[in-house]
Amino acid sequence: MIKNESKKNENKKWYRKMPHSYILLFMIIVLVTVLTYVIPAGEFTREEVNGRLVVVANSFSYTEQNPVGLFDMFQAIPAGMVAAANIVFIVFFASAFFKVIDSTGALENGIGVGVRKIRSKETSSTVLIWVVTFVFGLLGAVVGFENNIAIVPIGILVSLALGYDLMVGAAMTIGGMGLGFATSPINPYTVGVAHEIAELPVFSGFGLRTLYCLSSMAVLAFSISKYAKKIEANPSSSLVADVDTKGLNLSKNMEDYSMTGTHKAVIAVLLGTIGIIIFGTLKYKWYLQEITTVFFIGSIVVGIVSKMNPNDFVKIMIQGASEVTSGALIVGVARAISIILSSGNISDTIIYSLSMPLQNLPTMVSAVLMSLVHGIINFVIPSGSGQAMATMPIMIPLGDLLNMTRQTAILAFQIGDGITNLLYPTLGGLMAMLAVSRVPFDRWFKFIFPVVLKVTVAGWIYTIIGVAINWGPF
């Protein structure tokens, strides 16, 4: 009787009634297709500046309506797969890389030994959650977001080894890197591009942005710790209790773990691979294609170091890629949304319509609303540098008219563009990382939305401070 009642309550959980992520995305695709018939088509004039196409301020004009037809709507999905190919394949190769490493037992033994040592020192799990969250946040701030997809499984393994769930691991890694990247004072894709457009010294305004970055990470770490304590007291309250963790859990008791010479060599290859990615990203501006190549080479080196049979190596690579097929392909489906908006020529209309009402409001109110406008636009243009190039030539002159310093206008852009990246399925990197961590998007949204809301409010406080102190240099 009690068992049946428990099952009945479990079936009442909101996420059990949610449609599959693919269905949710298809519903959005249908909606934006309909919008191409409703929203007037329009476009800004664009000109090339320093090798980039930049929107010309005050150049918006309406154009002939170009609604997307039924066949084109469906065609946008395979087109999205092609457009998102770099992200799709980095998911496959990253998963295959970690599957090869996992097959050697090196990662599991390394984490088992590490967690055992931490526990022997009686280190609080809460302290560990904060440390791991800030470490991943630093990686996001310095290296980037999608570039770090390879290390998501490490956070997942640490979380499961500590007795927590996939959500804790995903929050520490994806949440940490996402917020670190979003609020980074040295983000070249958002702050750097925006500073260039605004004719400000690159990465100026470092102090206030750093405070915001640290505050954001603290909000996230506190939320993760609170959730961890909740599931520790009641495991059934986990948002991902029904998700299969096969292949991710530690398989032995802590005292049974040890590191052999081969294990240490494999871990050295793992750390070397991550180090090469970080170096290449910072030094040579590598992006997804180069990083995918490093994963592939790293997989081969692991196979050689562990003296793996070539046939077994290939089978393990294929198995690793197949385990994330669903999550990898959903990236392409999500990309179809922006393709339809662009094909229907309504992206610029949405940007223009959202920016116009800000002109007649007090500066502090306009600064806050500007971040909301960028947050909405981010659904249409999920690329940080892309949105900067599309909107900052409009928002910077608008900010000048409102007596808002350009640093403040850029912070508003940073909040709206970056923080919402953790919410939108149109961001391929987010969907890829969730695929690797096996956390369904709807469950992730349930956890991360309150965090995003709190971090956004904190950002508004810093934005208001920026207006109040006339945050310079101009």
Image: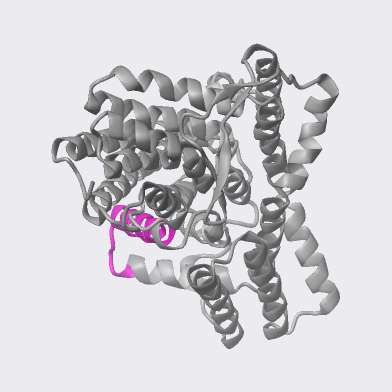
Extreme residue toward the top, this view: 38
Q: Where is residue 52 in the image (x, y as percent from the top left)?
A: 56, 51
Relative vertical location of residue 309 with respect to residue 425 in this rendering, above or below: below
Q: Foreground residue, 52 or 86?
A: 52
Describe residue 137's horizontal placement relative to residue 384 as left or right.
Answer: left
Residue at 23 percent across and 39 percent down: it is 462
Q: Which colour scheme is used?
A: one colour
Q: Foreground residue, 58 or 230?
A: 58
Q: Position of residue 328 (x, y in %)?
A: 70, 47
Relative vertical location of residue 121 with respect to residue 309 in this rendering, above or below: above
Q: Where is residue 197 in the image (x, y as percent from the top left)?
A: 42, 48
Q: Foreground residue, 112 or 302?
A: 302
Q: Is residue 30 visible?
A: yes
Which quadrant of the figure has residue 251?
bottom right
Residue at 44 percent across and 49 percent down: it is 190
Describe residue 376's horizontal placement relative to residue 200 as left or right.
Answer: right
Extreme residue toward the bottom, this view: 261
Describe residue 190's horizontal placement relative to residue 438 as left or right.
Answer: left
Is 50 one of the magenta-colored residues? Answer: no
Q: Can you say which quadrant of the picture contains the N terminus? A: top right
Is 127 one of the magenta-colored residues? Answer: yes
Looking at the rendering, the stretch of residues picked out in magenta corresponds to 120-140
Per the picture, the main secondary structure of the magenta-coloured stretch is helix
Q: Can residue 10 be seen in this view?
A: no
Q: Foreground residue, 402 or 126?
A: 402
Residue at 39 percent across and 39 percent down: it is 413
Q: Where is residue 394 in the image (x, y as percent from the top left)?
A: 43, 34
Q: How many callouts does the rendering have?
A: 0
